[in-house]
Amino acid sequence: MSVALGSLGLGASGLTFRASPRTTVVTPTAFGAVGDGKADDTLALQAAFAELARHPDSQLWFSPGTYRITAPLQQAFPDEARIVIYGQHARIDAREIAGARPGETAMVQIGGARLDRTGLENQVQKNEDTLSARLGEGGPKWGRGSVILLTSTELFNQTRPYYYKGEICRVKAIEESKIELASGVFDHYEPSLTSVFHLAMPYVEVHDLQIEADANQIGLAIEYAQGVVVSGCRVRGARYTGIYLNYIQGGVVTSCEIADAWHIGTGTSYGIKVGSCQDVTVTGCNIREARHCLSAGGQEPARNIVFQNNHCLKHKSETKLVSIDSHENVELITIKDNTCNGISVGARSAEILDNSVFGESESGGAINAYYSDRTDYLLIRGNKVHCKGANTIGVWITGERGLLNSPTEVTIDRVIIDANEVRSTASSLQIEPRNGSSTNISINDIVVTNNTFLSQRACGFVVSGAAPMSFGTISISGNSITSVNYDSILIRDGTEINLTTISQNVIEGNRSNGYLISLSGIDVVITGNDISGNVRGGGLSRSIYYSNSGQITSSGNTITGVRYDAELVRARRYRSGNPRPGARAILNTAGAEIAE
């Protein structure tokens, strides 16, 4: 949006003028700002921000130019105020601001505030929309439309540190101590562990503003706000975080550019960081030279976060990390249509869709999913993954215990890996515990379908690791799985699986002395696959290796290029219905019952 300021009419005071009877418009030049890049405009800009806070509906219009500041600009706005800043591509030069400690200073920090605090009086179950809090005489003065924050100390991650419970809620009605919410809560809350805060939440928009810094600090920070819009902004040289959103309810960051966002040795260096926010989308942004270009997760959980159609290029020094990172205390994140070098998620529910991913990490995966708590849903669909690193796994799913302050099993309800194209030197898809102490990790249901996996120097699909995992069912269907010199599908001994189904796949390998499919599990069904090996190498190539005490059914498969149909170790029963031309046989070292 572009408006000629002169057409709006300057007020008699020379300080403000009104675009409409309800909107107060402020200009920095009216407070003495010069904008020539030489004069110190700090006091003038701070005065303009303060003027915004005095009006419930106000706009700040910059004139094009460079505004030099020597101290951070900070302003809190009243609850439900409507604040719009039009930068008109003006540049705030903050390169003289260093800050004492990394991340303690934002060049521009605006938003609301955390206000009154009270205690929760009743136990609140997930999805309930009423709660009781101490709102008596002398307590917080809340009303319909107020926004509150629930915080809980019940689940704490000591390594970050942050909490796995907490959320922003809108009040629908209040009657004495009873608070009715606009929607049900996401989690269960105990009164002895939960605090309730009243928040001042203005509506904030920032358009077409440029910020240049030269420090391990934050460029633009917006905290405690709703309906946030950040569009067309550029931030350069803010090496702790370029744009930081925290405690935001509803917002979008669009068409922004972040550059020079990396500092040696820091644990942050985020391009855009979405902290303890709900319903926030980052789209159409260009982010480069960061440790993580996009990051989600704060002290309390982030929920319903969308990263879509962004171009993310991390700093060349970060050889072990990824461009897009979602921490564990995120519930429902969608990462879609981005171009990036690596994605990592620990969210309770996550969708990773249609991204172009260039895996360059020296360890881990191009797409990583790691979990330390119960997880509802993981969908990885339609991504094109090209791993450049020699040790980079295409898609890596792992679990780790011990991060929370209460003992808990790591349970993932459902994992779907669908219609991805993965080219890697290491494994294309690998599922395993993170380390030897990560026991009691289970996945109820895994579906791997319609993917193309090509692994140059490892197995195409691996379930393995330093500690046992347990699975309900694994379904592998409609895939093209090719491995060079290794098993195409490998499920190691010690893995507990109730039922594995492998059907309608094209499975290829050139290993002359090994297996195309190596399995462990209670019951296995292998049907309708096209399985092709390399018997010309002269070794004892086998189509299927099975090591467990259950039953394996292999039928309707087309098997070529192998010396043996199967090798059975500790198997109880083998049922075969495959056509067997030539002299192919079965190695039955287990003495299993064979039915054909």
Image (cartoon, rainbow, N blue to C red):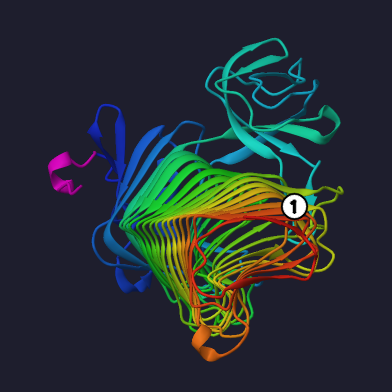
Q: Secondary structure at mark 1?
A: loop
- Is residue 147 positioned above or below 548 on the image? above
Q: Can the viewer see residue 313?
A: yes
Residue found at the very far front of the displayed protein: 582
Q: Amino acid at mark 1?
A: Ile
Say which quarter of the image contains residue 397: bottom right
Q: Which residues are magenta?
A: 1-11
Q: Position of residue 559 (x, y in %)?
A: 49, 68
Determine whether 263 is above or below 368 in the image: below
Nearer to me, 8 or 136: 136
Q: Is residue 526 magenta?
A: no
Q: Residue at x 30, y 33 (%)?
A: 23
Q: Is 175 on the left-hand or right-hand side of 272?
A: right
Q: Residue furthest top?
A: 175
Labels in figure, total:
1
Task: Check if residue 4 falls in the magenta segment.
Answer: yes
